[in-house]
Image: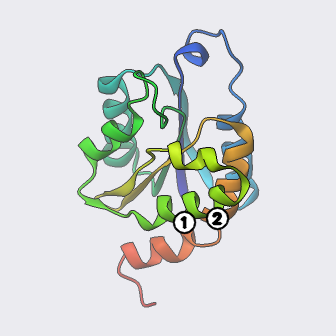
């Protein structure tokens, strides 16, 4: 599995905050046998996020793009809009499952606007920005990603 990790954070991109969730995603996916094909931080700028998502899917050939950050209600949180701008088809089950599980831990999970979908043969999934939330969310996602990729690639299931 070829995975790209994109942290979306104004403060992180300026070096004013240490990114904990991006490195955690990277390490966790490596632990599960994935190959990390991209690992970057960008500010909460719609066009920059769109450009990165397209680049990872179309040029780098990532199987999965995991974003972290920019999914809340803040005026600068535009990750869901960037994702919707680049996907061909929605795959809402990923983010629905995450929200269901996250609501068991905190009612604030309902504030997430995270999206998920497909661009060609790439799965793009928005995760929260907090390390605690990302840990919980990856526990939901990791078991289903291999089967999801098999289905997307047209393999028997």
Left or right for 100, reference 47: right
- Residue picked out by circle 1: 97
Residue 50 tag number: none
Which quarter of the rendered picture does the N terminus lie within?
A: bottom right
Residue 97 % position (x, y): 54, 66
Instruction: Give 36 or 53, whichever is nearer the viewer.
Output: 53
- Residue picked out by circle 2: 140
Instruction: Give 66 or 131, whichever is nearer the viewer.
Output: 131
Name the residue located 47 percent from the left edge and 19 percent from the top edge. Answer: 43
Residue 3 % position (x, y): 54, 51
Question: Looking at this rendering, what residue extends furthest in the bottom direction?
Answer: 156
Count residues near mark 1 (Cα–Cα under 10 Å), then give few for <14, some for 14-19, many for 20+. Answer: some
Residue 119 % position (x, y): 30, 55
Tag 2 secondary structure: helix
Identify the image quadrant of residue 73: top left
Left or right for 61, reference 120: right
Whether residue 33 appears in this view of the structure is no
Whole-number angstrom distance, CA of label 2 to CA of label 1: 7 Å
The colour scheme used here is: rainbow
Name the residue located 29 percent from the left edge and 46 percent from the top edge. Answer: 84
Name the residue located 60 percent from the left edge and 18 percent from the top edge. Answer: 12
Residue 155 % position (x, y): 41, 84
Pointers 2 and 1 in contact (CB under 8 A)?
Answer: yes
> Is residue 62 placed above or below 38 in the rendered structure?
below
Whether residue 150 appears in this view of the structure is yes
> Is residue 30 placed above or below 21 in the rendered structure?
below
> Is residue 110 placed above or below 38 in the rendered structure?
below
Count residues near mark 2 (Cα–Cα under 10 Å), then give few for <14, some for 14-19, many for 20+. Answer: some
Whichever of callouts 2 and 1 sits on the residue coming sooner in the sequence is 1
How many marks overall? 2
């Amino acid at each position: 599995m070829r995975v790209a990790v994109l942290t979306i954070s104004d403060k992180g991109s300026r070096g004013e905050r240490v990114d904990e969730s991006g490195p955690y995603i990277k390490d966790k996916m490596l632990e599960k046998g994935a190959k990390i094909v991209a690992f970057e931080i960008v500010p909460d700028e719609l066009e920059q996020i769109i450009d990165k998502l397209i680049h990872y899917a179309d040029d780098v050939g990532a199987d999965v793009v995991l974003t972290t950050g920019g999914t809340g209600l803040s005026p600068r949180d535009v990750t869901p809009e960037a994702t919707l701008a680049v996907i061909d088809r929605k795959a809402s089950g990923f983010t629905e499952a995450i929200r269901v599980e996250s609501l068991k831990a905190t009612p604030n999970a309902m504030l997430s606007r995270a999206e998920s979908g497909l661009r060609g043969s790439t799965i793009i999934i928005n995760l929260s920005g907090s390390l605690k939330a990302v840990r919980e969310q990856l526990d939901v996602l990791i078991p289903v990603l291999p089967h999801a990729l098999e289905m997307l690639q047209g393999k028997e299931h």
